[in-house]
């Protein structure tokens, strides 16, 4: 299919939007997607194909170059004429300055187009009658006008009470949604239950207790089960996370303890590399972003929206960790900043129906006098406890005497809050530090 088949655009904003997003790069594409731009938004189907190719290229290749977009849009059918017309579109906006404004214009035009189409289709079924038989015609016309108004309004009609009741009954008869992510430890999931889409699970603890290790182990269990996961790390580079995942997948056999020989170390290193190499098979299911790419909740929302547009919506999103996110309003008090970010993360989970694993720090008081942490120890804002569906507190087992530099630590996972189930459940697991992996207590 050639780009020459692109029809005259009734809204020049559509072409200019594509050009602005090509110029702006991955972040501009992500922002447009998050505001509602999809292939169906465009009046010209061919522009929709180009947009879909642009989103996929930005997602998979981390690039928006016109040639790469053209290759993905037209495949083997691409020719000089097609590329020439695509280049003409790209030249319409050399920068992304107007991308946001163009996004609004294109969405508004799409709504108006839907409204006109809906009205025309509905009124086409109305046949004017002579005499006093006009009441039925008026009822049909009024219904058509109402449907047109709905097309212009916010998409997604409110569910009726009957529909909600039917959903509840179905869940009770057939069992509630099983959930998408657990600990990766069956004996723990049996007690805690798996986290469902739309839920936020906060994992809180002091530094070094294994928060990140548990979170990425949970995400990896989804990936290895055929699902999709997105990990956002605000304190580690992506390559370091890959190294941890590679060791986790090897479990206890991956660990190097103090006093090992050079040969043992080299053997372990070879197994790490082999494990990492196998991770390439998860290219489409595991997405890792570091602080250079994602800094705020808005950035995370944009990335999730872009993955959804590319038919790669993650089942679970891991955010490591809340207190390192950039605040949208740096002038507000810190407690308000954290509260706002916590709320937006909860809304993101609901809007995209994804499970969110949100890591958080505990206050220093949580480790005083060997006391067990409490929900009140969540750092910087009580809103974290309020917004979370679950809160897991991680801390060393106080009933076990700690041994300095021991490779294995007994850690308590305390489900201090569970909005949709039982709270106050605690399980002791083993954290094997050399491979950053959690295991059933022996």
Image (tube, rainbow, N blue to C red):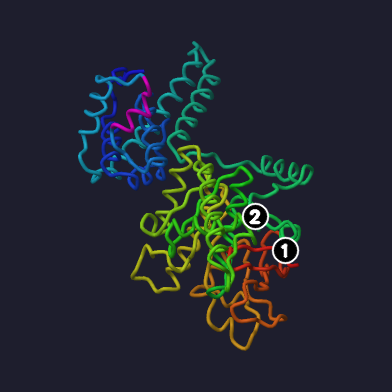
Q: Image height check: is 11 above or below 400?
A: above
Q: Image height check: is 389 above or below 57?
A: below
Instruction: Farthest residue to the right: give it.
Output: 173
Residue 171, given in percent of the width and then of the height, sits at 74, 45
Label annotation for residue 68: none
Q: Residues within 10 Å of mark 2 (few under 14, many from 20)?
A: many
Quadrant (top left, top right, bottom left, bottom right) of the N terminus: top left
Tell me which residue sits at (53%, 42%) in the image.
Answer: 281
Q: Nearer the viewer, residue 230 or 335?
A: 230
Please state if 186 lies on the left or on the right of 148 as rendered.
right
Residue 15, given in percent of the width and then of the height, sits at 28, 31
Which type of secondary structure does the marked residue at label 1 adopt?
strand
Q: Image height check: is 337 above or below 399?
A: above
Residue 148, given in percent of the width and then of the height, sits at 45, 30
Which type of secondary structure does the marked residue at label 2 adopt?
loop
Please state if 411 lies on the left or on the right of 302 as rendered.
right
Segment tinted magenta in the rendering? 67-76
Judge whether residue 387 is colored magenta.
Answer: no
Tell me which secondary structure the magenta stretch mostly adopts.
helix
Residue under label 2, please give it.
Answer: 195
Q: Residues within 10 Å of mark 1 (few under 14, many from 20)?
A: few
Residue 190, given in percent of the width and then of the height, sits at 76, 57
Residue under label 1, please give it.
Answer: 440
Quadrant (top left, top right, bottom left, bottom right) of the C terminus: bottom right
Q: Earlier in the sequence, mark 1 or mark 2?
A: 2
């Amino acid at each position: 299919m050639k780009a020459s088949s692109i029809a005259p655009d009734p809204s020049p904003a559509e072409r200019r939007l594509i050009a602005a997003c090509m110029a702006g790069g991955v972040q501009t594409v992500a922002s447009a997607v998050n505001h509602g731009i999809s292939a169906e938004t465009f009046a010209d189907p061919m522009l929709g194909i180009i947009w879909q190719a642009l989103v996929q290229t930005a997602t998979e290749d981390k690039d928006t170059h016109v040639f790469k977009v053209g290759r993905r849009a037209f495949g083997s059918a691409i020719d000089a004429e097609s590329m020439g017309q695509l280049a003409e579109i790209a030249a319409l906006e050399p920068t992304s300055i107007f991308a946001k404004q163009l996004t609004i214009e294109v969405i508004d035009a799409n709504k108006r187009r839907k409204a006109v189409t809906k009205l025309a289709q509905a009124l086409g079924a109305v046949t004017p009658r002579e005499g006093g038989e006009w009441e039925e015609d008026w009822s049909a016309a009024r219904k058509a006008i109402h449907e047109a108004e709905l097309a212009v309004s916010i998409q997604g009609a409110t569910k009726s009470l009957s529909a909600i009741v039917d959903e509840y009954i179905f869940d009770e008869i057939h069992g509630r949604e099983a959930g998408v992510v657990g600990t990766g430890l069956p004996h723990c999931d049996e007690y805690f239950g798996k986290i469902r889409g739309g839920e936020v699970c906060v994992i809180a603890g002091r530094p070094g207790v294994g928060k990140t290790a548990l979170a990425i182990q949970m995400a990896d269990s989804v990936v290895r089960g055929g699902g999709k996961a997105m990990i956002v790390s605000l304190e580690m580079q992506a390559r370091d996370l890959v190294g941890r995942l590679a060791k986790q997948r090897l479990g206890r056999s991956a660990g190097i303890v103090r006093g090992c020989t050079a040969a043992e170390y080299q053997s372990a290193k070879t197994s790490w590399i082999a494990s990492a190499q196998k991770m390439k098979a998860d290219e489409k299911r595991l997405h890792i972003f570091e602080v250079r790419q994602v800094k705020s909740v808005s950035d995370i929302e944009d990335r999730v929206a872009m993955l959804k547009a590319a038919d790669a919506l993650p089942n679970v999103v891991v955010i490591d960790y809340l207190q390192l996110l950039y605040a949208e309003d740096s002038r507000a008090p810190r407690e308000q900043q954290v509260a706002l970010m916590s709320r937006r993360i909860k809304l993101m989970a609901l809007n995209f129906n994804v499970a969110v694993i949100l890591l958080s720090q505990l206050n220093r008081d949580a480790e005083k006098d060997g006391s067990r942490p409490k929900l009140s120890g969540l750092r910087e804002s009580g809103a974290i406890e309020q917004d979370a569906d679950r809160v897991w507190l991680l801390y060393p087992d106080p009933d076990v005497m700690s041994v300095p530099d021991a490779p294995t630590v007994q850690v308590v996972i305390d489900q201090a809050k569970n909005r949709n189930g039982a709270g106050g459940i605690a399980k002791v697991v083993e954290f094997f530090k050399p491979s950053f992996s959690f295991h059933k207590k022996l």
